[in-house]
Structure formats: structure tokens, C-alpha cells
Amino acid sequence: MQPSIRKHLLWDFDFAAFNFFAGASIVIERVIERGDINDWKAIVNFYGEDAILFYSNKSKQLSKRDKNFTNVIIKSPLIH
């Protein structure tokens, strides 16, 4: 089982063998940084809002701007 995100977001991994549960932080960070609205919808449906906010807030890779954007977009009607 996996979220229906675009494969190029995980260009440096074997997409078919990628563990989307163990790699949740990677997937969430990539969608926050480079995802489109459909990628956002896919991770919200797959991981849930709480997990996305958790991984976003604890990320050392994401900028403060990306973290703030995540807090705004996660409640947006655009992805629900």
C-alpha cells in the first residue's frame, strides 16, 4: 500500500520497493517541498493530518517557511 504521489518525488529511491511507512518523513518532506495539490491530497489521505504536522515540525531539512506553509495548507479546503 502506498500514497498515489508522483514517482519523481522519490527519484533517488527504488519507488517499487520503497517502504512508505518507514520512509514517512522522507515522503512528507518531499511533498512539502516539491509536491502539487494532488500529492498533498494523497499524503493527507495516506498518513493523516497529525502525522504530517508531526514530521513537518520535527524535520531538520524543512525551512521555517515550509513548516509554516504546512500548518496553513493542512487545514485548507484545497486538500479536503
Image: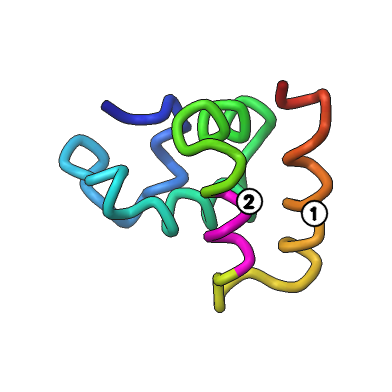
The amino acid marked with disc number 2 is: Ile
Asked if residue 53 lies in the magenta stretch, the reply is yes
Quarter of the figure that contains the C terminus? top right
What is the span of residues highlighted in magenta in the rendered image? 52-57
Query: Is residue 19 on the magenta stretch?
Result: no
Q: Badges 2 and 1: C-beta atoms under 8 Å apart? A: yes
Residue at the spot of label 1: 69
**On the rendered structure, is 12 left or right of 8?**
left
* Amino acid type, callout 1: Phe
Q: Position of residue 23 (x, y in %)?
A: 32, 54
Residue 12, compared with residue 31, is above or below; it is: below
Work out whether mark 2 precedes mark 1 in sequence or the reverse, and give the earlier one: 2
Towards the viewer: 25 or 14: 25
What is the residue that sits farthest to the bottom in this orientation?
Answer: 60
Which residue is at 42% across, 57% downward? Answer: 26
SS of the residue under disc 1: helix
The answer for how far apart the CA atoms under marks 2 and 1 are is: 8 Å
Q: Residue furthest front?
A: 50
Q: Tell me if 46 is positioned left or right of 37 in this view.
A: left
Of residues 34 and 75, the one drawn nearer to the viewer in this rendering: 75
Q: Main secondary structure of the magenta part?
A: helix
Residue 70, percent from left and from top: 73, 51
Q: Which quadrant holds the N terminus?
A: top left
Quarter of the view holding residue 37 = top right
For the point 77% across and 52% down, which residue is it? 71
Instruction: Please tell me which residue is depicted at 41% across the width and 29% down the height of the picture.
Output: 3
Q: Which residue is mark 2?
A: 32
Residue 35 on image: x %, y %: 61, 41
